[in-house]
Image (cartoon, rainbow, N blue to C red):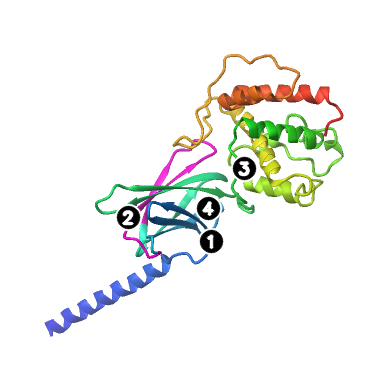
């Protein structure tokens, strides 16, 4: 009788373990769809897949394959998340194994819209950990993440974007990007205020790119895909970011744009500004903008005002 009871208890434990494993497998199945990025790391192919590219609770899959395309022998995968647009620190998680060479993590890793740096650290027996970086665009709820901005925010890009803005955007959005250009009073809704909409965490560069390319629904914002190339639209998006950077600099004196890990360098706070000049931003001036963002952004606004006064028919 006692043996029968022991066998019954053992059977129940085995059944419980089997059901628990089945439920765990159901909740941690590899994603069949979503947005994926693949990077080559030595002889390994590493793919990071998200169930969606929107702020909120996300599922992140990591698939590691060897040179033959078969799942690689990886002991563990650590994931780190950092926002590229501003310094919000770094969050880390250990992904759970869901199969050979397959790992998964679930959580609120992305707290706001923008460009995010995701690094997968692969742990293998007898080898140094292998770090594989990825860059992902995470959208605000109800918006599209859009494509990644392929351009660096360097001097030539910002200079080109400024020229495009002065030629095409000032009449509606105004010299300071506040949506108060000469034509703004006749428009309903009013043009966007870039000092509010281009701050980090509001919209992705890709979403802004799509709005410029395809137009903004139910507004006077037309599609520019027939007048501007994709390269020019990206230059314009990159320049528009300077309006949001100026807002951050004014509201948070000690703010340091860029994620931990060096996406952008800390910004110095100047003691004084140079007098505004009456010419467009020169190549040297644009380089100065990149080296010292706060000082340059305010100077750019002053120069932009001067250009508009000197060229009243532009735009």
Q: Look at mark 1 in the image and give the residue it sits on.
A: 34
At 76% from the left edge and 24% from the top edge, which residue is drawn?
Answer: 305
Q: How crowded is mark 3: few (under 14 residues within 10 Å), some or many (20 or more)?
A: some
In front here: 168 or 8?
Answer: 168
Magenta run includes residue 80: yes
Distance between mark 4 and mark 2 Cα atoms: 25 Å
Q: Is residue 258 left or right of residue 220?
A: left
* Label located before the other in sequence (2 or 3): 2
Q: Is residue 309 left or right of residue 45?
A: right
Q: Is residue 1 left or right of residue 175?
A: left
> Can you give x and y, in whole percent of width and height, for residue 266 in the image?
50, 28
**Residue beneath disc 4:** 56
Q: Counting residues from the N terminus, which is met first, the one under dot 1 or under dot 3?
A: 1
Q: Earlier in the sequence, mark 4 or mark 2?
A: 4
In the picture, residue 199 is in which quadrant? top right
Q: Badge 2 is on which residue?
A: 76
| Residue 1 in picture, x, y percent from top left | 13, 85
């Amino acid at each position: 009788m006692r043996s029968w009871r022991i066998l019954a208890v053992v059977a129940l434990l085995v059944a419980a373990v089997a059901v628990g494993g089945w439920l765990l497998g159901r909740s941690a199945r590899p994603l069949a769809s979503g947005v994926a990025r693949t990077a080559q790391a030595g002889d390994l192919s590493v793919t990071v897949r998200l169930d969606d590219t929107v702020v909120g609770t996300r599922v992140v899959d990591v698939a590691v394959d060897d040179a033959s395309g078969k799942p690689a022998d990886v002991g563990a995968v650590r994931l780190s998340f950092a926002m590229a647009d501003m310094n919000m620190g770094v969050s880390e998680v250990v992904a759970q194994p869901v199969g050979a060479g397959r790992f998964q993590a679930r959580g609120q890793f992305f707290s706001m819209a923008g460009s995010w740096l995701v690094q997968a650290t692969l742990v293998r027996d007898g080898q140094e950990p292998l770090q594989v970086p990825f860059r992902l665009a995470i959208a605000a709820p109800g918006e599209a993440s859009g494509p990644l901005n392929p351009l660096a925010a360097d001097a030539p890009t910002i200079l080109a974007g400024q020229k495009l803005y002065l030629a095409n955007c000032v009449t509606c959005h105004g010299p300071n990007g506040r949506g108060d250009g000469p034509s703004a009073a006749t428009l309903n809704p009013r043009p966007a205020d870039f000092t509010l909409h281009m701050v980090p965490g509001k919209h992705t560069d890709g979403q802004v790119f799509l709005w410029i390319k395809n137009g903004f629904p139910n507004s006077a914002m037309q599609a520019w895909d027939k007048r501007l190339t994709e390269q020019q639209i990206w230059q314009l998006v990159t320049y528009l970011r300077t309006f949001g950077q100026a807002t951050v600099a004014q509201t948070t004196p000690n703010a340091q744009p860029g994620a931990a890990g060096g996406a952008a360098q800390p910004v110095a706070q100047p003691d004084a500004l140079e007098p505004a000049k009456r010419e467009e931003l020169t190549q040297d001036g644009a380089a100065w903008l990149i080296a010292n963002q706060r000082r340059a952004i305010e100077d750019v606004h002053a120069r932009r005002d001067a250009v508009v006064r000197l060229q009243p028919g532009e735009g």
